[in-house]
Amino acid sequence: MELMLKLKLFEPRKGKKMLIEETIRQFKECVNNWIKALHELGEKPSRTKVHRYAYKKLREKYPQLHTDVLQEAMDLAIEIYRTWLNNPNKGEKLPKFDSDCIYFEGRCVKFDRYFINLPLAGKRVWLPMHVQARFKRYLQYKHGRVILKKVKNEYYIYVSVNVPEPEPYEPRGWFGVDIGIRHIIVVSDAEGRVNWFLNDAIGWKKNMECRIAGLQRLNDKKVKKGVWRVLKRLSGKVRNKQKYINHVIAKQLVLMAKMWRYGIAIENLKGLRRGKVGKRHRKRLHKWAYRDLINKIVYKAKLHGVPVVFVNPKGTSRTCSRCGEKGRIKDRMFICKKCGLKLDRDLNASRNIALRAPPPP
Ligand SMILES: [Zn+2]
């Protein structure tokens, strides 16, 4: 599985910083020169053609750039040029590459624990970086392209690593995951031994959104200056906190499932979009960044070998999880007339989801 790691460089010393800055400048120029060469060649030039046409010239012009970096610059230029060619509203002016970054082909970069080795301006340079504990083990695997990027005077390394996936185990049972109303998710297994309510940040989000809506009204009326800045900050905060909470929830869920050797059954959200399921279901989805949460659960489960299935959620909230009869909902409780089951409605739904997963062998 491809994983993208983002690592921050420690503030480099003056000399090394100059090397980085110089390489960034040359890389930018070089990409733009490749774009120019592509344009000179005319309609839809191929990789080989443009290489033959301009490589030698650019090699001489930028003797300090590593061969692989020069190639990466070409690939990037081709990508930019093609997008521009396909844009029906393009003007006369050629596209200009203006990002503070350098692309490195994977094989010209080395990692050693907390250090990265890069070819910069004709030299090989070791640079120390912050490596979060959870990223440490990934760096031992084979890595692909590395990008050095400058953001607000700080340098970041983006590296894609190829992490081997363990074969998913045979689950002994399933955790049903229901998208709750007051809780982000409610987890239960078919027998009701697990009853988890994770967690109540939905209320927090609602609160923040009320504040944002209030500010939005202020902003529309233009009575106060600088409201938009607060707005921007708050919505960024909501987004980031959702992502972080999703990360925590997904981790808890996956590790718990692994400990029990259980699989994870989630309701299939794809159907919801097409309006196959009721309004109530669709409405719940706007309360939280669920797509992000489900993506996180799926990828963390893959990393740990936990099996995941998607089940059809139709009717899961109305059906009795003990006898399968239709029941009714009153005061957030599910009540079954036939067998007398009285249970929290979200718990009942999550048990139904667990029941719909394939039975263990
Ligand atoms: Zn019942």
Image (cartoon, rainbow, N blue to C red):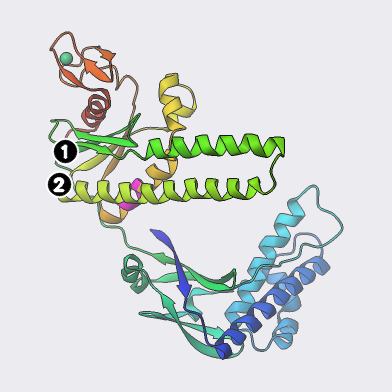
Q: Are marks 2 and 1 in contact (CB under 8 Å)?
A: yes
Give how far apart the Cα atoms at labels 2 and 1 are. 9 Å
Residue 110 vs 72, above or below: the answer is below
- Location of residue 299 in the rendering, given as x and y in whole percent from the top left corner: 36, 51
- Which residue is at 64% across, 77% downward? 24
Q: Is residue 167 above or below residue 338?
A: below
Which of the two labelled residues, at mark 2 and mark 1, occupies the earlier sequence position? Answer: 1
Task: Give the image quadrant in which the ligand numbered 1 is located.
Answer: top left
Q: Residue at x 23, y 51 (%)?
A: 255
Is residue 144 highlighted in magenta? no
Query: Residue 260's mark?
Result: 2
Element at badge 2?
A: helix
- Magenta segment range? 297-301
Task: Looking at this view, name the residue that lies furthest to the front.
Answer: 223
Please name the residue that numbered disc 1 is placed on: 173
Residue shown at 57% from the left, 91% from the top: 15
Task: Note whether 178 is above or below 13 in the view shown.
Answer: above
